[in-house]
Image (tube, rainbow, N blue to C red):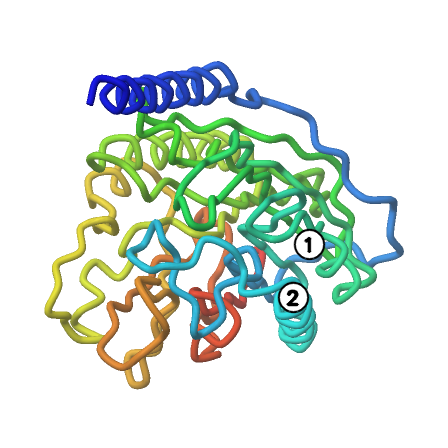
Amino acid sequence: MKKLLKVVICIILAVIVIAALYLAYVLISYHRLGDNIALTPSASISADALETDKEYKMVSWNIGFGAYESDFGFFMDGGTQSWAWSKERLDANLKKIGVKLAEQDADFCLIQEVDFDATRTYHIDERPYIQAALTGYSHTFAQNYDSPFLFYPITQPHGISRAGIMTLSKIQITSAVRRELPIETGLSKLLDLDRCYSVNRLAAPGGRELVLYNLHLSAYTSDGTIANEQLKMLLSDMQAEYEKGNYCIAGGDFNKDILGDSSKYFGKTDQEYTWAQPIPEEILNAYDIKLVAPLDENSPVPSCRNADGPYHKGQFQLTIDGFMVSPNVEVIESNVIDLQFEYSDHNPVYMIFKLK
């Protein structure tokens, strides 16, 4: 009996030591990439210059690191999967995403959740898939995820994750930087991305610039405070550029219900979700920048589903992807491209606009 007790105690102590060492590894490994990091645009392309009063098309799409096919449910959203189904399915899905992007023939593409070295995607670099589909585009890449090895779920640990946001333009990007966003300071920061947005500059008529912001704001927060602070930082940046005379457009995944109450369009669910709150009006009203929510009220399509399991009727759906523009940008049209969440837990959104 004493020998058995000693064995049990040794096992318990070993588990405690291993857990303590792992926690120390995670805490010591944690870091942020930094603010105002210069991004290198791809080599010069032969492209037309920007013009005023000409229609341009922009597409934004969170591709869910290529894994969120319609039968995928992510463990952090209530599902069971932590990796893409297989390397072969990931490869096929990324190629299909590339085809759908090419079909849009957009002047600008803002892509979020692009892995380049992650356990969940078999360490495949997904950037070449996007580049191969959109040839003739200038592009930049800003890393917004650099996590240590996550040993959860136990049956298939999520592992390390390195990912970012990719901006592509038919007009040459002249310069770009990565701006670091505030995130929570508690242990929850270990589950969040190293949030950022990229600032991409293009020459515009009259010595001005078109400043494109690609963003992916926080979702996994204890309250909405940090997400609001992230918005304020972005809006302040855009306002300052607008006051210099520049054109400003932001697009991406806001992780906010940008329709205010998406249930009006897509129905209520029997389960309460709190991760996507409306953008407070007082924040928007403090700036000249305007929110553009992609919507056809006669035939509304959501931009996102809650990936707590495979896509199904009655699943929580809402619109969290969209755009913001300065007053010198005229919005002609904005809507969601209905792909039935076949390739990602997000449908792409688009905006047609003019520079005044």
* Closer-to-camera residue (230/343): 343
In x, y percent, where is residue 352? 54, 68
Residue drawn at (67%, 78%), measured in percent from left and top?
103
Where is 70 relative to 78, above or below? below
Q: Which residue is mark 2?
A: 94
Q: As drawn, is 269 to the left or to the right of 97?
A: left
Where is 81 relative to 165, above or below? below
Residue drawn at (71%, 60%), measured in percent from left and top?
130
Q: How many marks?
A: 2
Element carrying mark 2:
helix
**Residue 230 shows in this picture:** yes
Q: Amino acid at mark 2?
A: Leu
Q: As drawn, is 274 to the left or to the right of 31?
A: left
Q: Which mark is residue 235?
A: none
Q: Amino acid at mark 1?
A: Glu
Disc 1 to disc 2, how far (Cα)? 8 Å
Q: Which residue is mark 1?
A: 126
* Closer-to-camera residue (202/25): 25
Q: Residues within 10 Å of mark 2 (few under 14, many from 20)?
A: many
| First-in-chain label (1 vs 2) | 2
In x, y percent, where is residue 243? 48, 32
Residue drawn at (31%, 22%), measured in percent from left and top?
7
Q: Residues within 10 Å of mark 1 (few under 14, many from 20)?
A: many
Quick one: quadrant of the C terminus?
bottom right
Where is 136 relative to 164, above or below? below
**Residue 324 shows in this picture:** no
Cβ atoms under marks 1 and 2 closer than 8 Å: yes
In x, y percent, where is residue 36? 59, 22
Quick one: quadrant of the N terminus?
top left
